Amino acid sequence: MNELHVDLSFPYCPRRCDYCDSLVATGRVADFERYADALVRELRAAAPEARGRIVMSVRFSGGSPVLMPPKALARVMDELRNAFEVAPDADAALQATCAGLSFDALGHYRKAGITFLELGQETFDGVQHDALGLCYPMNSYIDARQLLTFCSWDGLGMSLLYGLPGQNRVNLSTSIVNAVGFGAREIALAPLRLRPGSALHERYAEHPERFDALPRKAWPTDDERLALRAAGEEQLVAGGFTRVTQHLFSADGTLRASQRARCDDVDRLGVGAGAWSKLDGVVSRSTGDLTRYLAHAEDVRAITAAADVLTPVEASCRYVAGRLFAAEGFSHTEHERRFGASLPVPLRAELERLAEAGWATCEGDRWKLTCEGGHRYDDAVRRLAAAAQAEKEAAGHRGAGASPRVAASA
Ligand code: SF4
């Protein structure tokens, strides 16, 4: 039976953080309840599409799913178990901020089967916290730590950002020490990106000169960001963590199923506004229009904003990008086993260009990203996707018969 990963998106937050470009809305408890009802309706409607698959991982992602009333979250989990086949040991994770946790909520999460909390802390430095304009108070981690210890909750991960304005090795190191001391078994160390549309982008990209004279607010150069990544990685490895994906470090060296799903390109069902799915080689995205989503959640066709069938080259590209996100990369042999064909020429050519730029290496027949490639992972994927797109367009010009649209999953 094929594996399935279910991602439940909850696009509400107290307000928008300054560095955020995600789909985010604000609301009240009644809105969150209505949204949970819509998730239940969509799950029910989407279940026939996923027949024959077993759910190995489920993840509530944000926004801030910690705002969802815990009983409503339990209702969604119940519907998932009713409508889908869920493995008894499925990984069930919830993205959370320390500010949203309570004794009552943790009890409900546990009862609903949530086993892992992915805490978004980003930094333990007050100046950098303010620079990011985060929507939750930094010091909420102090109460959260006491609460989680009291509840013996040990399934914990924490995300940190590097390359923040004014960040140096000392304050990145302090954040890592705090995250380890918090009891995080997983630490995600990802680069801060200036995303167009975010308040931070407007502040820094349009007026960089304003910050140059302020060492605690200056935007780091690319070399400084790379050096921070290398220093953070070194500290985590010295502390007994193993790098399991380009950005994720694990204390026991294992990759949870919901994180593995990002590397293995398993079938995925995205439920909720703005969520995306990939089933049988068809990639689809739900509407980001919350009003529409709430009104039509039980009609999957009405809420699908875009859908595309992957060509063989695009399917290979997705596989390659996912495997490059994993620490061990991918081999030509694994690709051939999965697709019954060698790596498409445009992707091979692009990988060789990445290797020339120092972003990727090939040892034997195994490709991996270097530290620099990991730092530029998004750019590397964009380049691979552009190569796949160019091939798709060229095949279109050569004639429909030359570009069969097939399912991506083998
Ligand atoms: S908590 Fe996350 S999703 Fe919400 S506004 Fe902040 S960065 Fe965006």
Image (cartoon, rainbow, N blue to C red):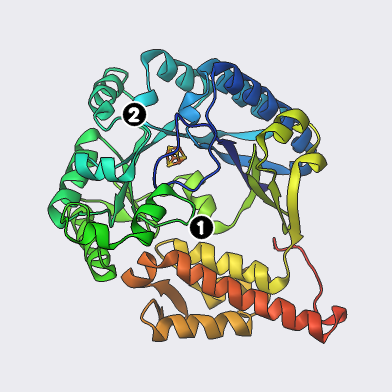
Which circle, 2 or 1, is nearer the viewer?
2
Q: Give percent across and percent down for residue 188.
A: 35, 49
Q: Are marks 2 and 1 in contact (CB under 8 Å)?
A: no
- Judge left or right: residue 27 versus residue 18: right
Give SS at disc 1. helix
Q: Residue at x 58, y 37 (%)?
A: 9
The quarter of the picture where the C terminus appears is: bottom right
Q: Gap between marks 2 and 1, in whole Å?
A: 27 Å
| Amino acid type, label 1 | Cys
Q: Give percent across and percent down for residue 160.
A: 31, 47
Q: Nearer the viewer, residue 397 or 365?
A: 397
Q: Give percent across and percent down for residue 153.
A: 34, 25
- Judge left or right: residue 80 versus residue 248: right
Q: Residue at x 66, y 79 (%)?
A: 390
Q: Nearer the viewer, residue 109 or 372?
A: 372
Give SS at disc 2. helix
**Mark carried by residue 263:** 1
- Judge left or right: residue 289 versus residue 192: right
Q: Quadrant of residue 75 in the image?
A: top right
Q: Residue at x 24, y 29 (%)?
A: 139
Residue highlighted by disc 2: 98
Q: Along the polypeptide, which appears first: circle 2 or circle 1?
A: 2
Q: Residue at x 81, y 35 (%)?
A: 299
> Image height check: is 17 above or below 352?
above
| Amino acid type, label 2 | Cys
> Image height check: is 282 above or below 353?
above
Residue 219 shows in this picture: no
Q: Give percent across and percent down for residue 291.
A: 70, 32
